[in-house]
Image (spheres, rainbow, N blue to C red):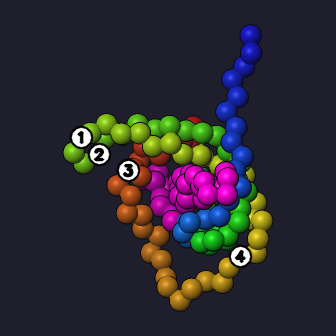
Amino acid sequence: MAGYYNRVILVGNLTRDPEIRYTKAGGQVTKFTLAVQRKLNETSFIDIIALGELADTCNSDLRKGQYTLVEGRLVIRMYEDHNRIKRSATEVVIDNMQMLTSRPKLSDESSDGAIDDDTFTDEIEALFI
């Protein structure tokens, strides 16, 4: 009997600066999107989640436009939106990140670490398992 294997390796550019949040239990969660080019005019935008210490590293070291390699597992999570409509989110929860280009300089803008994505809820705590 064959075992199961869930492993994703992606290389692409960050579409925006990473955004960090904290769970009620105090865990760190960083979210960003990676633009992965498949063909000359075909790009996929993949949501990436980093947890714990890696979340802090991604938040402090990565910037928009940076060419980055990530490794992790594919997760599909179900949730209800504000209108009680069932939705799903497909994300890659990473356990390894490698910057392939140097970090761009910080802009004068400051970030408060807030994420406007209402679907990014405490359900993310289940990913720590």
Give the Cα distance between marks 4 and 2.
35 Å
Looking at the rendered structure, the kind of residue marked 1 is: Arg
Mark 3 is surrounded, within 10 Å at the Cα level, by few (under 14), some (14 to 19) or many (20 or more) other residues, namely some
* Residue at which label 2 appears: 81
Residues marked 2 and 1 touching at CB (< 8 Å)? yes
* Residue at which label 1 appears: 84
Residues marked 2 and 3 touching at CB (< 8 Å)? yes
Looking at the rendered structure, the kind of residue marked 2 is: Asp
Looking at the image, can residue 57 be seen?
no
Give the Cα distance between marks 2 and 3.
7 Å
Instruction: Tell me where the magenta segment starts and ends, as one range.
Output: 19-47
Q: Element at badge 2?
A: loop
Looking at the rendered structure, the kind of residue marked 4 is: Arg
Q: Element at badge 4?
A: loop
Give the Cα distance between marks 4 and 1.
40 Å
Residue depicted at 56% across the width and 43% down the height? 128
* Residue at which label 3 appears: 119
Mark 2 is surrounded, within 10 Å at the Cα level, by few (under 14), some (14 to 19) or many (20 or more) other residues, namely few
Mark 1 is surrounded, within 10 Å at the Cα level, by few (under 14), some (14 to 19) or many (20 or more) other residues, namely few
Residues marked 4 and 1 touching at CB (< 8 Å)? no
Mark linked to residue 103: 4
Magenta segment: does it hold 29?
A: yes
Of the numbered discs 4 and 2, the one sitting upstream in the chain is 2
Give the Cα distance between marks 3 and 4.
29 Å
Residue at far front of view: 41
Please state which of residues 9 and 108 is positioned toward the viewer in this rendering. 9
Judged left or right of residue 15, residue 118 is left
Q: Which quarter of the figure has residue 12? A: bottom right
Looking at the figure, which quarter contains the N terminus?
top right
